[in-house]
Image (cartoon, grey):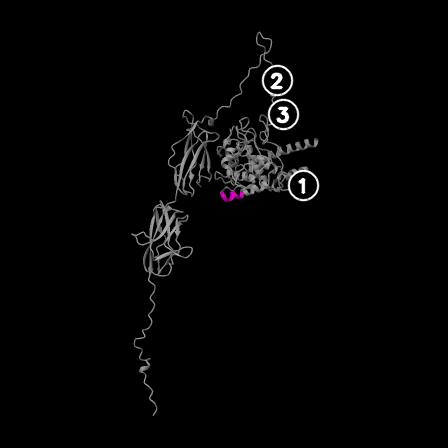
Amino acid sequence: MAAHIGRRLRKGAATTAVAAAAVAALSASQAPGATVDDQGRQNTGDATSAPDTAADDSATGNSPYYTDLPPLNSPAPSPSAGSGEAGDRSAAEAGIPATVLDAYKKAEAALREKKAGCNLPWQLLAAIGKVESGQARGGRVTADGTTVTPILGPQLDGNGFALIRDTDNGAYDGNRMYDQAVGPMQFIPSTWSWAGRDGNGDGRKDPNNIYDAALAAGHYLCRFDWDLSEPGDLRKAILSYNNSTEYLNTVLSWLEYYRKGTHEIPDGTGALPEDRSDARPGVTPSAPGTTPPARPGTRPGKPSGSRPSPRPSAPGTGSPSAPPTTPPPSTPPTPTDTVHHLEDAGTGTLTAMAGHTFAERISTRAETEAGKAVAKVRIRFTIVGDTDTTFAGGESVATVTTDASGIAVAPALQAGEKTGAFAVQAVVAGRSVKGVPYKVTVTQRVADALTRVGEKELTCVAGGEFAEPVEVKATYGGEAAGKVAVTAKLVTSADDPAENDKGPYFKDADGKAIRTLTGLRTGPDGQLTLPKLYADGTAGTFLLRLTTAGGATLEVELTVEPAATPSPDPDPSADPDPSTDPSTEPSETPAA
């Protein structure tokens, strides 16, 4: 027992020293312009410029987290790391369970491919995973990365935590009254519903799977086109995950610690953190997935402190009257609670060409039952349907807070390549108020002009092939029209669009002559080079007609010259050269 107490005292002293050192180091190296308030908390200089992170829109719902700071010693395991309890703990702190580490690195690789500009380091995922769940409770996961038992935060019932009523009917957290943060990266169900990813390729999006959760966390941190190699963007991303300056500093501490080096340890052997942000006076401590224990000095069901004195007896009675019962204080309604319905706020036609940004943006107004505007309400816009259209930043979900007039304007939509109609649904975040659907249409890419590149005449000899290729450029509104469909057809004449049955031709994959090509598309610069042209034995002038989606047309003239006439063979009936005609030679006179 004495040894245990001594270890706890040493740990407490070390943690205090680490905290002071970490805050000082972070103030100098991680947070330029940071200040410290009168309570000793660090204020990041540009924290106010972070996105509005209401509890029901942060990844975790601003749930409790572990506040243990990394040890002062180097994270790299030393030769003596395996000797003694202190060495074992240091090695465990620096180590990351094998499956968990693999999940972080795979997520980094996936984000490097999908969102290279985000520059997400796997060490950031490791830092968040350490703070949120102690690396999935020390790596207690199965071979596919699923936690052995679910990891649940406390219910977000407004009692010391955020108030987030159930949004998933208990599907993820088993709670049909309030939401709880779920899994090793502690996503609340309302966030997981749109941010969830399948990181291990099993066809499921499971918040309790470290591969799925790590990939989802990476996409969440990169959703606003932030560059996490920039300190300002890094801080904004972390604060959007859990909006707390202490959380920011703790994550940054572990980020720097893991950047200095780490090593792989067997699953299930990681060190479990002990200190949580809710284990403080006035806040009910709650470990993930457990019932909050009673505060020291109390018994379950009994209030702490001295027992109240009996109330004086009422006149004329011989016994004290029962103390009056005071109804529990009611939680005042939030702006979100007062929303009765949503209305379209004058959104125009939502149509754009594939690959282009929509000129019109979706506007939604939150109103009370009496039709009054409700400000400071989170409106979630979700793209629904078979489409690759996204909001700015490449995400299919965007959340915006209503302004003083109760209106939330969604980010601009960026049309993908899939054409057709789909919908964007606007709902109140954290409420089951009926949403407003918006019809959106993506049309095919078109061009309004088509010109030939180059002016050299296109000629060849009958039976030969054209040396110069046909090159054209499509434009729309004077700008290059990339990825526009083009049809090339050799027509009979300018007045007869029927396909010509003689003259120049293309070749198909089998080398057979064809005179109409479909499925051609211009490049990103709007240019297109047609396949090689050949000529049959027919000489003359021919027309190649090119048309694009949108109606742009271009006719290119092709000339086929007659084949060269070979020299005729000598006529045997013609008079021979007298000098060589044997009949003109004198005959020999026989000798006498």
Q: Which residue is mark 3?
A: 296
Q: In front of the other: label 2 or label 1?
A: 2
Q: Secondary structure beneath disc 1?
A: loop
The Cα–Cα distance between marks 2 and 1, rounded to whole angstroms, is: 53 Å
Find residue 251 and report its horizontal and vertical position in percent: 56, 36
Front-most of 319 and 278? 319
- Label 2–label 1 contact, CB within 8 A: no
Q: Would you say residue 82 is visible in this rendering?
A: yes
- Name the residue tied to disc 1: 82
Residue type marked 2? Arg
Query: Relative to residue 24, is residue 567 drawn left or right?
Result: left
Residue depicted at x 56% and y 28%: 39
User: Tag 2, which secondary structure?
Assistant: loop
Tell which residue pokes out farthest to the bottom in this image: 592
Tell which circle, 2 or 3, labels the residue nearer the N-terminal end. Answer: 3
Reply above or below: 429 against 543.
Answer: above
| First to last magenta residue range | 108-116
In what quadrant of the picture does the C terminus appear? bottom left
Question: How many residues crowd around disc 1 within 10 Å: few (fewer than 14), some, or many (20 or more)?
Answer: some
Q: Which residue is mark 2?
A: 307
Amino acid type, callout 3: Pro
User: Which quadrant does the N terminus fall into?
Assistant: top right
Q: Principal SS element in the magenta part?
A: helix
Residue 45 can be seen in this image: no
- Residue in view at x 35 percent, y 49 percent: 547
Q: Viewed as shown, does residue 328 lie left or right of 74?
A: left
